[in-house]
């Protein structure tokens, strides 16, 4: 955000003269200092000398229209019972502004009257609900954390058409009742050092290798080493480093895209790509094709899944491509330690952020890289034979299971019509693969290419099949949350409803997404168990489910407050508390029961 103007601007103000002034005219002199900026800024000074008549005069119609328009742009002064939360380096403004068309809101910005109160260059994320508006700001160099904190300023709300829908000013004189200072009991980005973030990212990358999407691809890649165990050590190790380069480069590329989008004003976090139905559909296609490849239905060439039999260059390209593929199939996964590390990374400089994401990639690449340095471990496996093909075929079924799971995620995002559309795309892709087995003539290649184009078109056309009710989430009320069955899916997340519920009793908030494997494991192993549900009932805990399957700025803002850029996140509020305890990313029944026992 910036405080500049472009083209023409009129700043109206009133001048009052004494009641006993007897002159027929009044001379007014003034000077204004301006800073004119394009690529560089040039200071200038403008002087004004006017002689104005005193008394009633006829208004010039053209000037009257200009002044009327300028007055209409003056923010409306309204009295708001605003609440301010201070969490780490963030300021969260909670305003009961009535937003009648939240689905059309494109931009919301807060302009403080006080210089240096906030960091002007930092992203301002916001969340909308029936209860009002929440804006997340970053503290500036002149921020004064005192009981007399003055947050007077202007809020600008702009609808998607570009026309300003609401332009309001508000004044908050934050005293003891309007300011809360929240603390976090989990691994906090405030306390985390760069070295700790790099270590956590590395550990998270190691654990990613055990995720159901990644493990089959990694297993087949490792099996390919069995057939080359007698190759030179130099060749094996070079393949290991090329594979690692593919993984690390892919993570850095995803991170760079995420950082660029956030700098452009997007309220997104880690896993943002899976909030897009197009990406989910593409991954479903990819997992389906990998499964067919593992079954031997078609061969994508030794250069991709093995070290390659087409010469060194092709083999090294295959190792790099497998590293990219492993990163792509790891997209739906969030491992323990990753959340805090990634959240910290996105608050740092670009170089530090990319370094942390590079560490994440190196952790994921390390197991395979170590095997290239320890070929004797491979000698303990049986000699190459039919068992390798059998294992490869077995690994096809986790890939098919992943494709089915992604179709379920897609159904939550676009509804049954869009999901059926992509299922037809899978059928068409299967037909294309079968055609290619028949030969390589043009009579075969042309229909196969047409089939692939049809499958691609079905992804592109997904937007038209999304029901309008799924394009904008409606907030869940406190009453709906209290009656909520944990096997259902609430319609949205309402921050103000959570705060209201906290005043009546303890609250548990589950930040999750259908595409988050860790989230689903935690729900099965802990949150949905009868013991945990009974404990919540006995403690009168109100349960909220903040579903981030599709983009939700309110959820993104809350994640940022707690130093996270992705799910899962588990918050447990005691009754009347102004801050929440944060549970670990990987839950067990015992962890949740212990936390509930402390209420």
Image: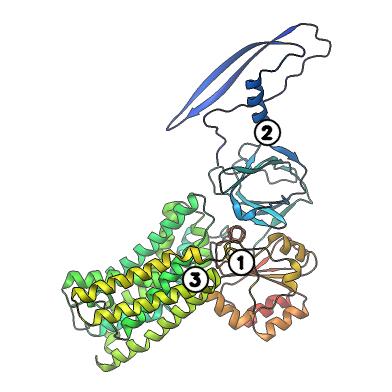
Whether 76 is drawn above or below 192: the answer is above
Where disc 3 sits, the SS reads helix
Q: CA distance from mark 3 to mark 2?
A: 45 Å
Residue 72's disc number: 2
Q: Which structural element holds mark 1?
A: loop
* C-beta proximity under 8 Å, tags 3 and 1: no
- Residue 571 picture quarter: bottom right
* Colouring convention used in this rendered image of the protein: rainbow
Relative to 160, residue 446 above or below: below
- Figure quadrant of the N terminus: top right
Please provide percent x and percent y for residue 492: 64, 65
Task: Give neighbour class at mark 1: few <14, some 14-19, many 20+ (Cα, 10 Å).
Answer: some
Please indicate, yes or no, whether residue 588 appears anywhere in the rendered image. Answer: no
Which residue, given by chain and number where applicable, does mark 3 sit on? 418
**Residue 158 placed where, x, y %?**
60, 45
Q: Quadrant of residue 173?
A: top right
> Residue at image x 34%, y 62%?
249
Kind of element beneath mark 2: helix
Q: Is residue 85 above or below residue 579?
A: above
Q: Residue at x 29, y 93 (%)?
A: 387
Q: Earlier in the sequence, mark 3 or mark 1?
A: 1
- For disc 2, the neighbor class at 10 Å (few under 14, some 14 to 19, many from 20) is few
Mark 3 burial class by Cα count in 10 Å: few <14, some 14-19, many 20+: many
């Amino acid at each position: 955000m910036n405080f500049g103007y472009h083209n023409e601007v009129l700043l109206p103000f009133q001048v009052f003269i004494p009641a006993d002034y007897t002159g027929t005219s009044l001379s007014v002199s003034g000077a204004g200092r301006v800073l004119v900026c394009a690529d560089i800024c040039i200071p200038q000074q403008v002087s004004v000398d006017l002689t104005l008549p005193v008394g009633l005069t006829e208004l010039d119609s053209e000037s009257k229209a200009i002044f009327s328009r300028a007055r209409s742009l003056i923010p409306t002064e309204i009295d708001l019972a605003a609440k301010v939360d201070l969490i780490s380096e963030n300021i969260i403004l909670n305003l009961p502004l009535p937003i009648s068309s939240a689905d059309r809101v494109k931009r919301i910005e807060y302009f403080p009257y006080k210089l240096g109160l906030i960091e002007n260059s930092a992203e301002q994320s916001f969340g909308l609900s029936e209860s009002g508006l929440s804006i997340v700001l970053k503290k500036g160099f002149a921020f004064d954390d005192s009981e007399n904190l003055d947050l007077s300023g202007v809020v600008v709300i702009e609808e998607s058409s570009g026309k300003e829908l609401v332009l309001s000013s508000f004044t908050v004189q934050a005293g003891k009742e309007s300011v809360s200072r929240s603390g976090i009991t989990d691994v906090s980005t405030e306390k985390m050092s760069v070295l700790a973030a790099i270590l956590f990212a590395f550990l998270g990358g190691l654990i990613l290798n055990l995720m159901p999407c990644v493990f089959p691809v990694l297993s087949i890649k490792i099996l390919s080493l069995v057939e080359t165990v007698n190759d030179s050590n130099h060749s094996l190790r070079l393949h290991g480093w090329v594979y690692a380069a593919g993984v690390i480069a892919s993570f850095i590329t995803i991170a760079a895209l995420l950082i660029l989008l956030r700098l452009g004003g997007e309220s997104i976090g880690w896993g943002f790509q899976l909030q897009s139905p197009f990406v989910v559909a593409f991954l479903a296609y990819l997992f389906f094709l990998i499964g067919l490849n593992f079954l031997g239905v078609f061969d994508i060439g030794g250069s991709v899944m093995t070290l390659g039999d087409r010469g060194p260059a092709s083999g090294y390209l295959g190792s790099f491509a497998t590293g990219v593929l492993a990163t792509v199939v790891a997209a739906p996964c969030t491992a323990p330690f990753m959340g805090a590390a990634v959240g910290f990374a996105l608050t740092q400089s670009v170089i530090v952020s990319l370094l942390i994401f590079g560490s994440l990639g190196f952790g994921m690449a390390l197991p395979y890289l170590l095997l290239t340095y320890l070929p004797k471990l491979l000698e303990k496996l049986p000699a190459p034979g039919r068992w390798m093909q059998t294992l490869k075929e077995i690994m096809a079924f986790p890939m098919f299971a992943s494709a089915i799971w992604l179709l379920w995620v897609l159904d939550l995002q676009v509804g049954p019509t869009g999901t059926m559309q992509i299922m037809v795309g899978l059928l068409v892709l299967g037909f294309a693969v079968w055609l290619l087995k028949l030969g390589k003539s043009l009579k075969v290649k042309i229909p196969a290419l047409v089939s692939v184009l049809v499958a691609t078109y079905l992804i592109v056309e997904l937007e038209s099949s999304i029901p309008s009710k799924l394009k904008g989430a409606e907030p869940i009320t406190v009453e709906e949350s209290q009656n909520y069955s944990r096997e259902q899916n609430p319609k949205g997340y309402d921050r103000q409803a959570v705060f209201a519920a906290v005043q009546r009793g303890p609250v548990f908030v589950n930040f999750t997404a259908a595409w988050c494997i860790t989230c689903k494991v935690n729900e099965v192993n802990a949150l949905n168990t009868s013991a945990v549900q009974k404990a919540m009932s006995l403690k009168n805990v109100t349960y909220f489910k903040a579903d981030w399957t599709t983009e939700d700025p309110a959820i993104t803002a809350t994640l940022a407050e707690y130093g996270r850029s992705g799910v899962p996140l588990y918050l447990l509020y005691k009754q009347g508390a102004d801050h929440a305890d944060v549970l670990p990313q990987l839950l067990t029944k015992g962890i949740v029961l212990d936390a509930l026992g402390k209420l």
